[in-house]
Amino acid sequence: MKKFVLYVLLSTFSFGLIIGLINYIIDPFNIFETKFLPYQFQRNERFIKIKYLDKQHTQFNSYLIGSSRIGTTNPKILESYIPNSKFYNMTLSSATISDELRHIRYMILAGYQPKNLYLQIDLNNNMTSYLYPISDYLRKPHPHVTGDSLPLYYLDYLLNPFPTNTKGKILKNIEGKSDDNYNLMLGNWNRPEKDKKISQNCSDFIKSEPTFNITIKPKVKNTYTKMNMLALKNIIELCKNKHINLILFTTPHNHNYLDIIYEKEYYIFLKELLNITNYWDFSGYNSITTNDCNYYDSSHYTPRVGSLIAARIFNDKNILVPSDFGVFVTHKNFENHINQLKVDRVKWKSIQLAK
């Protein structure tokens, strides 16, 4: 019995040691920054960005914040419109408003002293998600944000097996390339290879991108909208109390992505948002969202779209922004806006059926 117990203990220790070494060397979420394998498959932005900003936040006084879709926007664009601003792109994978509230609260408490917040609201994420579970290691917040133990956080990433992410990172390094060009010092990213393909022959690019060529059926309803809208109300009150300039707008989802949402639920979401505040709306089937050349895939728009969003919000006459892209929504124009969205949708669906 003693030998058996000793064998079990040694086996458990050996297994934990092997898993720990694999996780430390391969570093599937870029938590340890070991850099034995330089090309990243996935990265936990919630951890690495707070780790970076805790030391470097004095360089910044303003933040872009939202899901990965705002990640393609260069912070320098915002600085050109807001005097004396230094922006950092706080893009967080699949971020919800509740998730953003948690990070904004931390940034204020930690002394980041934000003066401007450029906040993008996704429809899908905020309709279907609230706060991600602790078992979601890609989206697990930095322990400084949650008040948990940093050593235990590291230990958690050492001792848990991550076969999918480990395999993904190994394959990326065998290929010798990464999908994106990630700039931790500014927080943004882009995809140079796809930019090149789009500029050279966008038609071929669209044909080769799987997410542009699939049949989509609606499935998204307003499951968590009210909870996220309560979080938005808290963000607005927090910004008022701390004298933070808040700029709020919706994501210009690609038409393929927008098709996932039930039409009625989509309009309800926009109404729920208006019940909290006025906002800039870039969603809908407009000349930008129905042109796949403006997207890396059905989920992420290119840096050009981020520039057009900012140009519309800040009324930049030097940049040509399509007239149907971006509406400032208030109670006075909401019904007309919804009616126009419905007309645009019917037109786009008619074009699709005619093909």
Image (cartoon, rainbow, N blue to C red):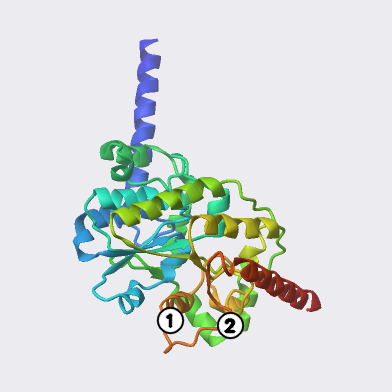
Of mark 1 and mark 2, the one earlier in the sequence is 2
Q: Which of 160 and 334 is in front in this view?
A: 334
Three-letter code, disc 2: Cys
Residue at mark 1 to residue at mark 2: CA–CA distance: 29 Å
Q: Is residue 82 left or right of residue 208?
A: left
Which quadrant holds residue 208? bottom right
The residue carrying mark 1 is 315
Which marked residue is nearer to the observer: mark 1 or mark 2?
1
The residue under the point 58% across, 60% down is 270
The residue carrying mark 2 is 202
Q: Which residue reaches farthest front?
A: 332
Q: Do the residues labelled 1 and 2 touch (CB within 8 Å)?
A: no
- Callout count: 2
Where residue 297 appears, x then y in whole percent? 56, 69
Residue 148 visible in the current orientation: yes
Q: Which residue reaches farthest top?
A: 1
Secondary element under disc 2, as helix, strand or loop, is helix
Image quadrant holding the N terminus, namely top left
Where residue 33 appears, x then y in whole percent? 29, 54
The residue under the point 34% across, 62% down is 38
